[in-house]
Image (tube, rainbow, N blue to C red):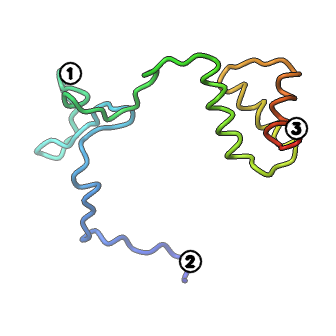
Amino acid sequence: MSGEADEIDTSVSDSATQDAPETGRGGTRATSAGTDGEVTPPQADTPVSPDGEQDGPALAMHTTDDAERLDGLLAQVRADLAGQNRSTVEHGLRQRLGQVGLQLDDDEVARLVDELAGTD
């Protein structure tokens, strides 16, 4: 390689980008080029997503209780940290607990770490 960037072949059509709707991040409409090449903002009454179509994240779709969140968290930690030592498992577990806002006492954390690290 010469160390220079390869030239981009603009004759190749990428259907994923050619057919993409004019949406920006979070499902908001992006600006579009007008007929004379000027960029025009979207109209205020332009819908963000077509009816019946979701093109952005849907947050808080389902409510969960702490036990369900803990079960899901433990499944993730078990999958992600399988075979790791006790210290790594404890660090990962405490980090994940903090991320989801669950608080457990030290005895419960120690019990879960023993279970996850296979030392129970």
Q: In the visual, does 58 lie left or right of 97?
A: left
Front tag of 3 and 2: 3
Q: Earlier in the sequence, mark 1 or mark 3?
A: 1
* Callout 3 amino acid: Asp
Which residue is located at x 10 percent, y 44 percent? 35
- Find disc 2 in the rendering and name its residue: 3
Which residue is located at x 69 percent, y 46 percent? 80
Residue 99: image quadrant is top right
Look at the numbered discs 1 and 3 and tell me whether their residues touch, using CB distance below 8 Å: no
The residues bearing labels 1 and 3 have C-alpha atoms spaced at a distance of: 60 Å
Percent position (x, y) of residue 65? 58, 16
Percent position (x, y) of residue 67? 64, 20
The residues bearing labels 2 and 1 have C-alpha atoms spaced at a distance of: 47 Å
Q: Of residues 112 and 97, which is closer to you in this image?
A: 112
Which residue is located at x 24 percent, y 59 percent? 15
Q: Secondary structure at mark 3?
A: loop
What quarter of the picture does the C terminus occupy? top right
* Callout 1 amino acid: Ala
Q: Of residues 89 and 59, which is closer to you in this image?
A: 89
Q: Secondary structure at mark 2?
A: loop
The single residue placed furthest to the front in the displayed view is: 120
Mark linked to residue 44: 1
Q: Is residue 86 above or below residue 1?
A: above
Mark linked to residue 120: 3
Residue 113: image quadrant is top right
Which residue is located at x 39 percent, y 74 percent? 7
Q: Is residue 58 above or below residue 76?
A: above
Percent position (x, y) of residue 48? 25, 28
Q: In the visual, does 109 lie left or right of 25?
A: right
Q: Secondary structure at mark 1?
A: loop
Percent position (x, y) of residue 98? 72, 25
Check disc 1: other Cα within 10 Å, few if <14, some if 14-19, many if 20+. few
